[in-house]
């Protein structure tokens, strides 16, 4: 693979990775949000695969395969099961409307590019120049986590945040050791299973999965 082809494909994968986060912010249909999250998992797998092929590292290719199985297969499958169990179809009451959310995503992306500029200038390369994309997804994931009220939407926000952190690790330091990635992936899988149980119990107790209902437990 030539350097030019590698750069173009890496930019394409990073663009798809960031676009998926923005689309999750835009969409209200929960089933569509899960499908877009699976697509982002494929984009993250493509980033890791391209880095592995460019650097001739088989460990990165193994990590990329694991990312594809977990983040584009297992996690979306578990979220679809949770969605079917909850019986809900839409994020009906976000704390911030769509227009303001998209403007905030644009502002967070600009902030990510401004903050990461010194890091990019230390070692300019196709991977480090794409570093702001991973940081922007971290910020957008955190924004979704604090502005959505449905449990499943907050799970997706948490997973977007984790995807962004993983992308930053790949782009800044050519990935993490396989054992570390397996440990993090296991933690993420465990968190999703716990949240799946939580949403099922909330649905049984309150008839919906609005996080605000948890305040009744405190009262």
Image: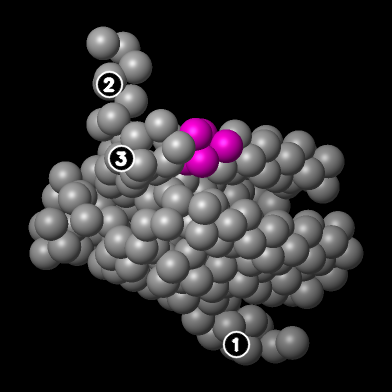
Q: Nearer the viewer, residue 125 or 76?
A: 76
Residue 7 falls inside the magenta stretch: no
Specify the label residue 196 is tagged with.
none
* Mark closer to the chain start, 2 or 1: 1
Specify the label residue 4 is tagged with.
1
Q: Tell me residue 146's x, y (percent).
A: 29, 38
- Under circle 1, the secondary element is helix
Question: Which residue sits at x=34%, y=35%?
Answer: 206
Q: Nearer the viewer, residue 88 or 164?
A: 88
Q: Nearer the viewer, residue 126 or 67?
A: 67
Query: What's the magenta region?
Result: 197-201
* Mark closer to the chain start, 2 or 3: 3
Which mark is nearer the camera, 2 or 1? Answer: 2
Mark 3 to mark 1 CA distance (whole Å): 48 Å
Residue on which the image places disc 3: 210
Specify the label residue 215 is tagged with.
2
Left-right relation of 65 to 34: right
Residue 165 seen: no
């Amino acid at each position: 693979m030539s350097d030019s082809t590698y750069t173009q494909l890496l930019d394409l994968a990073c663009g798809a990775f960031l676009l998926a986060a923005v689309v999750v912010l835009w969409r209200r249909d929960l089933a569509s949000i899960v499908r877009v999250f699976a697509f982002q998992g494929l984009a993250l797998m493509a980033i890791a695969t391209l880095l592995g092929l460019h650097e001739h590292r088989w460990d990165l290719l193994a990590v990329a395969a694991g990312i594809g199985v977990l983040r584009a297969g297992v996690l979306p499958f578990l979220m679809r099961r949770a969605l079917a169990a909850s019986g809900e179809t839409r994020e009906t009451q976000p704390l911030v409307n769509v227009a303001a959310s998209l403007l905030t995503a644009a502002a967070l992306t600009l902030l990510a590019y401004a903050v990461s500029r010194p890091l990019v200038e230390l070692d300019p390369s196709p991977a480090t120049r794409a570093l702001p994309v991973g940081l922007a997804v971290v910020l957008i994931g955190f924004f979704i986590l604090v502005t959505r009220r449905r449990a499943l939407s907050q799970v997706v926000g948490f997973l977007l945040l984790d995807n962004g952190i993983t992308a930053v690790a790949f782009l800044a330091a050519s990935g993490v050791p396989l054992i570390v990635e397996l440990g993090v992936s296991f933690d993420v899988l465990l968190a999703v299973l716990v949240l799946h149980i939580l949403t099922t119990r909330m649905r049984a107790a309150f008839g919906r999965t609005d996080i605000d209902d948890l305040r009744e437990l405190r009262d």
